[in-house]
Amino acid sequence: MATLIIVFIALVIIHFIYDGIILPSVRFKFRLRIFEIRDELRSLKITHSNDLSDELYHDLHESINISIRFLHQMDLKTLFWANRYVKNHHDVVADIISRRNSLLEECKLGEINNLTSELYKNVGYALIFNNGVLLVLLSPFAIPLIFAMSLFSEIKSLIRMLVSIPENEIEKEVIPPESLSPA
């Protein structure tokens, strides 16, 4: 019994250090990188206004702003809610994704694809770090975790869909209202 209490106390201390000290710094680094991506997008719009359609620019800009705003909430629970939203509103999300993909294909700037890939990568890393303590707790179950990593492409597509959902829909449908308070 004493060992169990010591283990729980150690887990509480680890969680406090990670969630209260380490994670905010790491998350801040990802936020800054996403701000840089937004600045690069704005710079591309200024320098190549003819090659970058207004619709694609506004679409990507909104996705970046959504990523910045909800970065602290990118975790497995949010992916679960986003997956449920996608299943319930498949036609809407499919239309948004197909519209964005066609706009990306029509765009003559290769830098745009690099920016979107960089955005998805940073949101994905934030997702991993936001679940850091959970991953430590699950480390004894490494085999299922390795299996979960094989689902990475599924997670990547969910991230792509999550940052593509309009902000007002995220607030109403994806993230429950009680969890919208800033971290």
Image (cartoon, helix red, strand yellow):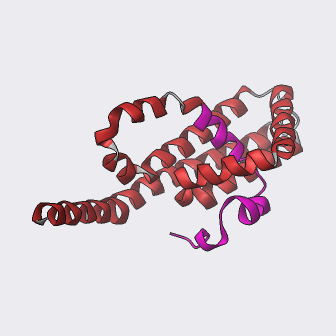
Measuring 36% from the left and 31% from the top, which residue is drawn there?
A: 143
- Residue at the extreme left: 2
Where the N terminus falls, by quadrant? bottom left
Can residue 72 be seen here? yes
- Magenta part of the chain: 154-183
Q: Is residue 95 above or below residue 132?
A: above
Viewer-side residue, 22 vs 96: 96
- Left or right: residue 107 compared with residue 160: right
Q: Could you tell whether 53 is left or right of 135 in the image? A: right
Q: Residue at x 32, y 50 (%)?
A: 137
Most foreground residue, 96 or 81: 81
Residue at 66% in and 71% down: 177
Q: Main secondary structure of the magenta part?
A: helix
Residue at 65%, 41% in the rendered image: 158
Is residue 74 in view? no
Instruction: Pinpoint residue 13: horizontal percent, then vertical percent.
Output: 24, 65
Q: Residue 147 lies in what quarter of the image?
A: top left
Q: Position of residue 55 (x, y in %)?
A: 88, 44
Q: Is residue 163 covered in magenta?
A: yes
Image height check: is 119 above or below 171? above
Q: Position of residue 183 (x, y in %)?
A: 50, 69
Where residue 17 sits: x, y (%)?
Answer: 28, 62
Above or below — where is 27 with respect to 122? below
Q: Quadrant of residue 180?
A: bottom right
**Residue 73, relative to residue 47: is it above or below?**
below
50 drawn magenta: no
- Which of the two residues, 76 or 37, is positioned nearer the viewer here? 76
